[in-house]
Amino acid sequence: MGTREVDVLIVGAGISGIGAAYHVKTMCPNRTFAVVEGREQLGGTWDLFRYPGVRSDSDMHTLGYRFKPWTSRKAIADGPSILAYLRETVEEFDLARHITYGVHVSRAEWSSSEGRWTVIARQNGEEVRYSCSYLFMCTGYYRYSKGFEPDIPGLSTFCGTVVHPQFWPKDLDYAGKRVVVIGSGATAMTIVPSIAGTAAHVTMLQRSPTYVVARPDVDSVAEFLRKFLPAKLAYRLVRFKNTTMQQFFYKRMRAYPQQAKERLMGFVREAVGGVVDVDTHFNPTYFPWDQRLCLLPNGDLFEALKAGTASIVTDTIRTVDTRGIELVSGSRIDADIIVTATGLHLVTLGEVEFAKDGELIDFSQTWTYKGMSYSGVPNLATSFGYINASWTLRADLTCEYVCRLLNHMDKVGATVCTPTLREGEESMPQRPWVDGFTPGYMNRVMHLMPKQGDREPWLNPQDYKRDIELFRKSAVDDGVMRFTATVPV
């Protein structure tokens, strides 16, 4: 099979890749592009995860695309609804003909003499190759083939069923069963209320608590505006409202962490009405937004706790035996099913091996350029969203910038763009790629990520207002992005 040549190759057909395809098609109409996806259908996260209750943990007016209004009534939407929205986006903007499925990318090689990437993949057991002048990685941030599985003593001896949410069995019958969900993140807090009432009882077993906040799953402002305004205008207004509120409350909580902690725990006390020991089960050792807050639509977890169909245990596992879990405190939880909602296995750039002129690229030795590209690495961008707001807000901005960049290259006759350190910047103070965010799933891979500096554009600010300036309004030719013409235009 020959090498397929395109101007822009987008890797991944999830929420980021579909957004990238739309932007390249509409903003760079003279550029050819293709999307390759390792799975057999689009959707990424929203196709992979099939556990009960799977849903967004951000409102869909900000998790949805800027260019396509979310018109469904529920702002906190379930997985199938989000997947339908993505399929509708692909159909509406005629993107399906650009997507090829079952293409597993393993390596990308940059040739300075040719000014192109060669992308090596496998499809149907055979090697396939793509050649592109610009490579846009939209693969997400975790390993699709494997979730994070900590070493839980004795788990292999358990005689019941063990399930990881990333690979939820289609035929799993939990009706009338005793279920233990190990974990305290968004996945655990989604599964527990979703199966409570059908299972005999559900126990959420956490080693340490997480901050939670309950919100209605329907945005009343959006409902009101849609009655009187065109859908696009109503969506734009609600999106502005929600992004503004997200950033306001995030910054307030970071500025006044102790007050934020007390306020959040106060909300929980009001909601559970003395049924749960809040100081034990909802009192994290860290401050709000050191890790992401968990959203409870309509307070569903609280309702399950008050109904007695679910409970929370905060303890450490000593061992798992044939019938259940023994805890360090001396207590035990008998179970028929154990769900290991223990998190994701994060990766850099979709587990793809990168090389430049024959030498492997170690991204941990690079500096991040606007949180999307890498010092010394030409014609490459990565879509990575927010950890403190909706993913798509940043993905949209990244796509806009990439298209501005491509159009500028056409304008000046450049074929190569490379983020390049200015004199003296090699000695910049180093910070982690994501600063001030401490969950285990991030800390486990932070040493593999690029470094963040102390000045623009060597920053990954995770600040929507600042990113608007950085991506949408700042000059493309900023003295850092170096433009050259390696091959004839």
Image (cartoon, helix red, strand yellow):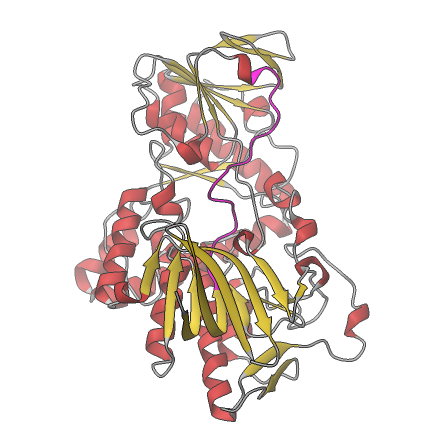
Count how many numbered circles sit on residues in the image: 0
| Magenta residues (range) | 137-155
In the rendered image, residue 57, in percent from the top left (x then y), is placed at: 42, 44
Whether residue 149 is visible here, answered yes or no, is: yes
In the rendered image, residue 475, in percent from the top left (x then y), is placed at: 56, 83
- At a point 57% along the width and 59% down the height, the residue shown is 462
Please, is residue 125 above or below residue 235 in the view? Answer: above
Query: Was residue 143 drawn as part of the magenta stretch in this picture?
Result: yes
* Viewer-closest of 140 and 281: 140
Q: Quadrant of residue 442?
A: top right
- At a point 60% along the width and 85% down the height, the residue shown is 483
Please, is residue 149 above or below residue 418 in the view? Answer: above
Q: Residue furthest front?
A: 1
* Viewer-closest of 178 and 449: 449
Q: Quadrant of the N terminus?
A: bottom left
Q: Residue furthest left?
A: 227
Query: Was residue 463 drawn as part of the magenta stretch in this picture?
Result: no
In the rendered image, residue 238, in percent from the top left (x then y), is placed at: 33, 60
Query: From the viewer's perspective, is 194 left or right of 210?
Result: left
* Prevailing secondary structure class for the magenta stretch in the rendered image: loop
In the rendered image, residue 372, in percent from the top left (x then y), is placed at: 56, 65
Query: From the viewer's perspective, is 310 left or right of 381?
Result: left
- At a point 26% along the width and 46% down the height, the residue shown is 81
* Viewer-closest of 292 and 480: 480
Q: Quadrant of residue 103?
A: bottom left
* Viewer-closest of 66 and 411: 411
Whether residue 241 is visible here, answered yes or no, is: no
Please, is residue 223 above or below residue 321 in the view? Answer: below
